Image: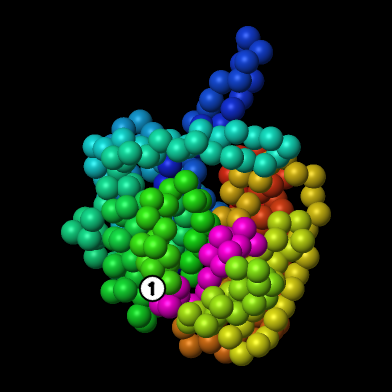
Amino acid sequence: MILCCGEALIDMIPTPTSTGRDGFVPHPGGAVFNTAIALGRLGVQTGLLSGLSSDMFGQQLTEALRASHVDTSHIIVSDRPTTLAFVRLQDGHATYSFFDENSAGRILGPDDLPQVSADVSSLYFGGISLASEPCADTYAALLATEGKNRAVMMDPNIRPQFIRNIDTYRARLDRMMAMTDIVKVSDEDLNWMFPSPLSLTEKVNAVLDIGPSLVILTRGGEGATGFMADGTEVSVPAKRVEIVDTVGAGDTFNAGVLAKLYELGALQKSRLATLSADDLAQALTHGARVAAVTVSRAGANPPWSAEL
């Protein structure tokens, strides 16, 4: 099982009303939640480890997980509120306003964590959970204890508005990347991590120096490139589709990559360290294919395997 560890929240999506003004409709979302949903729909055994509320939005999230065949046995339920993200769409691109104080997902401590079951073979981390405290420290501790013998992928998906102490965040991110096999970053992420005037390739190499076996760089419509620690480099183009919006695009790309590596039997620490160029190309291509379906329709609505 791939266990996705991080936030699940409600995206409040603007929708026209009968009066002509936009209202907001609640849709299940969150970067890590989206990846878990996409994996489940792609037929990969997957679960979510997150803090969910017992409120109406938490129930909506739980129902959505089960409907996409995502295991919920690692969910921590509390009566704290659900995180809400109000979305603004402009030319198909999304910006967010978050309401996250004292939420069920954010207020997680190490003592709240369940025992990770023996059938979990891989871990995935990402999103605002890596920046929002105290849960960020809790997920870092989880990685340190449970990631030693499991394949690990991380997408920091950096959102500066969530970072209250830059030095603390950078130090925690570096510690986690050192224990991670696959780090996926966008060009925006890299430029935030390394603001100095280096090329993107030099910044990727700086991430590889921290410890991962593979860094995947995504650049929207320009496609994705995988950089192995041994110098292997593989690029794939983005699949051209008519874009409705980009909500969840990167999250479902990650699911496509993980699903293909899982199918190839390559989602293991030893295999990832010596991943072939062909296997990497297959994984990146599958990620682009899955993401293309998601951006062709409204909201984070990843495809089922039959749709591919």
Q: Is residue 194 magenta?
A: yes
Please identify the residue farthest to the top as the structure is shown.
19
Q: Residue at x 75, y 44 (%)?
A: 243
Q: Residue at x 38, y 43 (%)?
A: 62
Task: Tell me the quarter of the image containing the N terminus.
Answer: bottom left
Q: Nearer the viewer, residue 109 or 56?
A: 109
Q: Tell me if mark 1 has few (under 14), some (14-19) or many (20+) residues whose alpha carbon lies within 10 angstroms of its own.
A: some
Residue at 75% across, 70% down: 236
Task: Give how far across and how far down residue 179 sits, in percent.
Answer: 41, 77
**Residue 224 left/right relative to 273:** right
Image coordinates for residue 176, horizontal then vertical, percent = 40, 71
The question of residue 94 being in magenta is answered with no
Is residue 50 depicted above or below 228 in this figure? above
Is residue 46 something one can see in this rendering?
no
**Residue at point 32%, 47% (across, down):** 106
Three-letter amino acid code of the residue under disc 1: Arg
| Visual colour scheme | rainbow
Dot 1: element: helix
Residue furthest to the left: 111
Extent of the magenta region: 176-195
Please give the residue where the numbered disc 1 appears in the rendered image: 175
How far from the left and from the top, in percent, is residue 156?
49, 61
Residue 85 in sight in this render: yes
Q: Is residue 233 left or right of residue 129?
A: right
Q: Quadrant of residue 282?
A: bottom right
| Quadrant of the image occupied by residue 299 | top right
- Whole-percent x and y of residue 12? 51, 32
